[in-house]
Image (spheres, rainbow, N blue to C red):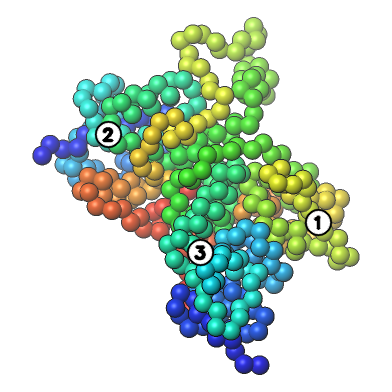
Amino acid sequence: MSDIKFTIDGKACKAKEGQSIVEAAKANGVYIPVLCHFEGLKPAGTCRICTVKVGGRFMAGCTTPVAEGMIVENMTPEIEDMRKAIIEMLFVEGNHMCPTCEKSGNCELQALGYRYQMLVPRFPYLWPVREVIADTPRLYLDRNRCVQCLRCVRDIVTADGKHVFAVTNRGDKTLITIDTKLAAKLSDEMALKAMNQCPVGCILRKEVGYKIPVGQRKFDSKPIGSEIEGR
Amino acid sequence: MSKPVVATASLAGCFGCHMSLLDIDDRILQLIDLVEFNKSPDDDIKTFTKQCDIGIIEGGCCNSENVHVLKEFRKNCKILISLGECAIMGGLPAMRNGIPVKDCLEEAYLKGPTVDENKKKIIPNDEELPMILDRVYANHEIVKIDYFLPGCPPRADLIWDALVALVTGKPLNPAYETLKFD
């Protein structure tokens, strides 16, 4: 099968049939920010951070397959400011207290805040009241920090096909919840996988908080995406 | 030209941001050459003695006194900077947002496990005491704030770079390592 040729911000790129814009961009050393997308999972397109412009129209880069001759706009001031606005919106619609969060330094939302140099959100703080679920042996859910990416819902499934995490309610009342009976039976490995799957500090493994010292955490010295751009 | 005049205050903060300002080490000598300090806990000047150019605010507003001080700063300073997470979004004190004030006070003075010697079951209510607000507010929810420097605390290098940029009229391009939220 021959490669598909397309461009991102004028750079000639090649992709394989069926690859999404985000995946193809990554293969060509171009970073498109993602939050709800995780390699190996079926894209959900919930967060819209990966929005790009194709033929003058906004599209989610994680759900749109590349087509021959596609002209993708990625880093234009308009798109970058819109992405920054989405990050700021996520910060105000939850209760994100970075100084108290175990995920700080390893958090993808925070890392995007750093990358886009968010100094203050442009939107008013909402301070929603959300309960913490801590009655499972290995995990706790601080839903104040949830960005509803659904990575946990899609990925954390028991051997017999049951989903450990689920979504309840709708609209601005949407909450992630956990099946406490299934969660009680989670292996250490699965619990760790659930924590690592969460881009923010919503799903946390108990008893391992603040394990990595400040300065050595994932995004302390390198911006998110630099591993792709540096290739 | 006379030196720009700087004032600072700590509202609902922990003084960590002020400590971080002192963390610029020997550059503090250059800072003294660059600016003049007015009302600030660092020099212990209690009241504004002249119009200031730059007001640096640590901490958000959790009571009526914080709001009063913040408004005084807005009146007396041409430029206001929110310094640190508490000033920008309420920070740790804002963890009480979402919990009714009554519940917070009862936990602190009546029901908490460390409450001792409060036999008359009094929640402090002297009129001299500032009123606790319904929630903790970011400073820009109360007055116009011109610049924001995040961090808990903001890194000393960020504060230094920002002050130098402001005083010399150059744009601030913060280094990646200096712009953090924790």
Circle 1 — which element?
A: loop
Q: Is residue A77 left or right of residue B94?
A: left
At x 33%, y 50%, the residue is: B157
The picture places residue B109, in percent across and down from the top left corner, at 62, 17
Nearest the viewer among A70 and B101 is A70
State the separation of the CA atoms marked 2 and 3.
Answer: 36 Å
Please report, as a chain letter, where disc 1 is located: A
Around disc 3, counting alpha carbons within 10 Å, would you say few (fewer than 14), some (14 to 19), or many (20 or more)? many
Tell me the amino acid under the disc marked 3: Ile
Task: Give me the disc on residue A224.
Answer: 3
The Cα–Cα distance between marks 2 and 1, rounded to whole angstroms, is 55 Å
User: Residue under mark 2: which chain is it in?
Assistant: B
Q: Which residue sits at x=61%, y=66%? A: A60
- The crowd level at tag 2 (other Cα within 10 Å; few <14, some 14-19, many 20+) is some
Across and down, in percent, residue B76 comes to: 28, 27
Q: Secondary structure at mark 3?
A: loop
Total numbered labels placed on residues in the image: 3
As drawn, the label of residue A96 is none
User: In the displayed image of the protein, which residue is found farthest to the front?
Assistant: A56
Is label 3 on the same chain as label 1? yes
Residues beneath discs 2 and 1 located on the same chain: no
Badge 1: few (under 14), some or many (20 or more) residues near its Cα, within 10 Å?
many
Badge 3 sits on which subunit?
A
Label of residue B78 in the image: 2
The quarter of the displayed image where residue A163 is located: bottom right
Q: Which residue is found at the position 65% from the left and 10% from the top?
A: B121
* Residue B139 rendering spot, x and y as whole percentages: 44, 33
Q: Secondary structure at mark 2?
A: strand
* Amino acid type of the residue tagged 2 in the rendering: Lys
Q: List the residue tagged with mark 1.
A: A164
Residue A148 position (above or below residue B6) = below
